[in-house]
Structure formats: structure tokens, C-alpha cells
Image (cartoon, rainbow, N blue to C red):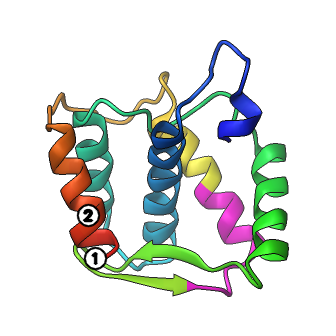
Amino acid sequence: LEMAALGTEHELMHGESVACDMAYMTVLAQQLSLTTVEERDRTLNMLRGCQVPVWSPVMTYELFVEAVANRVKNSMGQNFPLAVGIGKACIVNDISDEDLKQAFMRWQELCAPNAKANHPEVHVPAAALLHYVDNILMP
């Protein structure tokens, strides 16, 4: 995503691309019933509160499919890091194309600027996001 956005009006810094990926993975985890809807929304709202992007117009479904194929090729499998509730994670390798697509479509619905989902304004210091990533998602 970061490289695809480079030089466009939607250019992203590395951390912003990571935040978009975290948002998608959060939706995917809920799609696979590893987290609840409440946990998904709590995580997405925390990211929004940190004022990092949770979506990019550069991430089309075609780019997503290409990125997944590259990930499988270069990571010896899917190796998706997914939340299992709040504060725990696992690596998942057997996600169907249909689940990936459904999660992508739901991510678009929840996170695109024109999304109809309820997005309360929550402001979280960036340090809190770093703590969350370093100590909760990747302990």
C-alpha cells in the first residue's frame, strides 16, 4: 500500500500504511469470529482516535489480491497476524479467498470516509497507540 500510494495525492507514511493494515486485519479477525463486533469497533475507534488512517483509496480490491499473493509467496504462507479478542493474537494461514473478500468489503463499509458506520470521535495520544501495538498486539 505504501509503495502503491507513493507519489500520488494519497501518499502514506509507513506507519499510516501499517494503521490501514491493522484496520483491515481487525475486520478480518471479526469476520473469522476471532473477535466480537464490539472488540472490532473498539479497535477501529482507537485507531481513529489516534488520528491515523484506517482506509486508503489506493487499496483497491485488485491491489489487495496482489498484496495477498505476494505475502503468500514471500512469507511461506499467509501468516496473517490476527487479534484473538483484546490483548492476544495468533498467526493464521488458512483463510479462504471468500473470507478475505468479505472482510475487504466490510472494511470498505466500515472504514471508507463515506462509511455509514457510527464513528464516535475519540482522541487517543499516539503514545497510547505505540503502547497498544508493542505490548498488546505484538507482546
Quadrant of the image occupied by residue 95: bottom right
* Residue where numbered disc 2 is placed: 39
**Relative image position of residue 65 (x, y in whole percent):** 81, 56
Q: Tag 2's secondary structure? A: helix
Residue 96's disc is: none
Q: Label 2 crowding class (10 Å Cα cut-off): few <14, some 14-19, many 20+?
A: some
Q: Look at the image and tell me in which quarter the C terminus lies.
A: bottom left
- Cα separation between marks 2 and 1: 7 Å
Residue at x 80% of width, y 45% of height? 63
**Magenta span:** 92-103
Looking at the rendered structure, the kind of residue marked 2 is Glu
Tally of numbered tags: 2
Quadrant of the image occupied by residue 51: top left
Residue 100 highlighted magenta (yes or no): yes
- For the residues labelled 2 and 1, say whether their Cβ atoms are less than 8 Å apart: yes
Residue 56 highlighted magenta (yes or no): no
Residue at x 28% of width, y 54% of height? 43
Looking at the rendered structure, the kind of residue marked 1 is Gly
Residue 85's disc is: 1
Q: Is residue 128 above or below residue 39?
A: above
**Relative image position of residue 90 (x, y in whole percent):** 44, 85
> Closest to the observer: 73 or 66?
73
**Is residue 57 left or right of 131 when viewed as pictured?**
right
**Relative image position of residue 6 (x, y in whole percent):** 71, 26
> Closest to the observer: 74 or 89?
74
Task: Give the farthest residue toward the top.
Answer: 9
